[in-house]
Amino acid sequence: MMTLNCTKKFAKRLPFPLVETPQLSTNKLGPWCANSFNISRFPMILITNERTLLSVLIHLKEIRSFHSRFLEALEVLFHSIALSSKDIYAELDHMKTVQFTTNTNRSTLGSMNDFVGHIWATLNYDENSTLTDISFRLSEIPCAPLKYAFPRESVLEVIDPPPHRVQFKEHPN
């Protein structure tokens, strides 16, 4: 089960019930945060993982299907950042069930506001960018809450951490 923390603005658009006290997320990445905004006259949804700041941009159209469209876009993004198929489908399987709440994380919201600025800049620079292109570019932005690591690197650390390395002490001469 995944938790989707929605801003009040986005929650008003949802035709789904909100949960006051959500259960713990069972997916490795943990809770996600969603906010809506407009690009010109097109309503969009930015969905950002609270732990890694990996973000997915999708159209707001057909609000009832946005969860399945989010998972489809996330699968493509996971493949583009080189997660193994086994890890991708295990994570997506845990995310099939969603609970909606308004318990948003202020730090994540701040990063999302920065990402909206990057989205605007990307579209002003290259108006032919697809939503998938933009989501991938957002995964390559160093983020202060991640100590200037990239979201894609953070996802790999969480889902497919490196093997334990033996730390050798320096030889005292």
Image (spheres, rainbow, N blue to C red):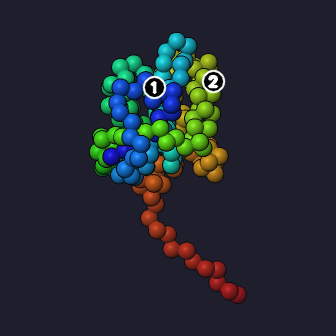
Residue 20, position as x, y percentages in the image: 42, 42
Q: How crowded is the residue under tag 2: few (<14 C-alpha within 10 Å), some, or many (20+)?
A: few
Q: From what the image shows, is residue 39 above or below residue 69?
A: above
Residue drawn at point x = 39 percent, y = 52 percent: 24
Left or right, 1 with reference to 150: left
The residue nearer to you, when weighing 90 against 133, is 90
Q: How crowded is the residue under tag 1: few (<14 C-alpha within 10 Å), some, or many (20+)?
A: few
Residue drawn at point x = 48 percent, y = 18 percent: 43
Residue drawn at point x = 37 percent, y = 50 percent: 23
Which residue in the rendered view is the most extreme toward the bottom? 173
Residue drawn at point x = 63 percent, y = 24 percent: 121
Q: Disc 2 residue type?
A: Ala
Left or right, 97 with reference to 144: left
Residue 151, position as x, y percentages in the image: 53, 44
Q: Disc 1 residue type?
A: Lys
SS type, badge 1:
loop
Q: Which quadrant of the structure image shows residue 169?
A: bottom right
Residue that label 1 marks: 12
Whether residue 82 is visible here, answered yes or no, is no
SS type, badge 2:
helix
Residue 76, position as x, y percentages in the image: 38, 35
Residue 22, position as x, y percentages in the image: 39, 47
Q: Which quadrant of the structure image shows residue 167?
A: bottom right
Residue that label 2 marks: 121
Alpha carbon distance from label 1 to label 2: 28 Å
Q: Which mark is residue 39?
A: none
**Mark 1 or mark 2: whose residue is earlier in sequence:** 1
The residue nearer to you, when weighing 151 against 98, is 98
